[in-house]
Amino acid sequence: MKVAAVVVTYNRRELLEQTLAGLEQQSRPVDKIFVIDNASTDETEAYLASRAFTVEHRVVRLPENTGGAGGFSEGTRLAYEEGFDGVWLMDDDTIPREGALAPLVTTLGDAEERLGFRPSFACSMVLWKDGSMCEMNTPEPTWDWIRPLALGADYTLMKSCSFVSVLVTRQAIHAVGLPSANFFIWYDDAEYTQRLSKYRPGVFVPASKVDHLLPQNRGVNFGDVNDQNVWKFEYGVRNQIASAIRFRNPALAVDLVERVYAQTRGSGVSRANKVRLLKAAARGLRFRPEIKHARSVR
C-alpha cells in the first residue's frame, strides 16, 4: 500500500516542524509527504523551501487561504492523482508517534479479511499533550461498532472522525469524491467521513496514537463564543446544517440546536453573537457542500 501524508498548514511553522519530524520517523515509512501551505504570512514558506526532507515530498503553496477544508481537498486530489493507495490526513499541530501509521495500514488489511470489505478509512487515537483523551477529536461509532470485536479484532467500526490522523483509501475517494473545499473550516472532516462511511464504514485503531497540540483540552463548546472566535463557530453551524440537509438527517440539525441552546444558556455569550449563530444556521439551509472528484492517475 503506497501511502501519502497530507499536512495542511497556516502560520504555525514551529508546530509544523514537529509534525514533519514525526512523519519522517515512522516505523512504517510514508511514501511521500504533501505539505499544503494555505498562503501563510509567517516564515513557513521560507522554512519549507530550505528544509532538508528525508522523505520524498511536495510543497504546494496556495495563492490564498482556503481554510483547512480547501487545503485537505487539494492535498487529497494531488495524492489521488499521483496514484497513492491511501491518503493520511492531518493538521499542522498533529504529532504522529513513531508507530502511528503501521497499525492503520495493517488494520485495513485485517478488516478486509475478517469483515469481508476494506473500510473507507482508519483513524487514530488522538491524545492531548498530557496523554489524556483529546476532547476535540472523539470519533463517532456506527450502530454495530462492536462487530469486529466479536470476531476477535482490536478495532471498532466508525461513522465519522476528525482530520487529525485519518488514513483514507483510494477506493473510497474514487467512490465519494474529495473533501468539500467550500466548507473553509469546521465540520468539513465530519461531513467527509460521514460521506465515506455511507460507502463503507471506517475503523478506529487504538494502537495508532498521535498527539494533538491544542492550547487547551476542550471540545467545541458554544459557551466559549466571543467576539474574537465567533467566526469559527459560524462556519461550524452553517456547515453542520448544510450536512444535515445533504444527508437528509434532521438529527444532525436537532443535535446542533440542542447543544447551542444548552451551552450558551447562562454562559455570558452576548445576544449579538447568538444572533450571528442563528443567521449562520439560516445560511446553512441554502449552502451546499461542493463535491468534486479527482481525475484518474497521471
Image (tube, rainbow, N blue to C red):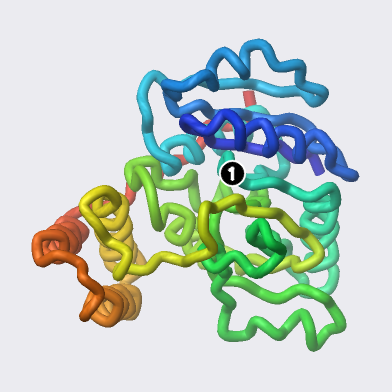
Write down the quadrant of residue 127 in the picture.
Answer: bottom right
Q: Is residue 197 visible?
A: no
Q: Amino acid at mark 1?
A: Asp
297 on left or right of 70: right
In the image, 134 versus 60, the foreground residue is: 134
Q: List the residue tagged with mark 1.
A: 93
Mark 1: which secondary structure? Answer: loop
Name the residue at 14% across, 58% down. 276
Q: Is residue 151 visible?
A: yes
Q: Quadrant of the N terminus?
A: top right
Picture coordinates of residue 70, whole percent (x, y): 42, 37
Picture coordinates of residue 180, whole percent (x, y): 40, 46
Name the residue at 25% across, 54% down. 230
In the image, 281 versus 219, the foreground residue is: 219
Picture coordinates of residue 87, whole percent (x, y): 66, 43
Q: Is residue 219 above or below residue 214?
A: below
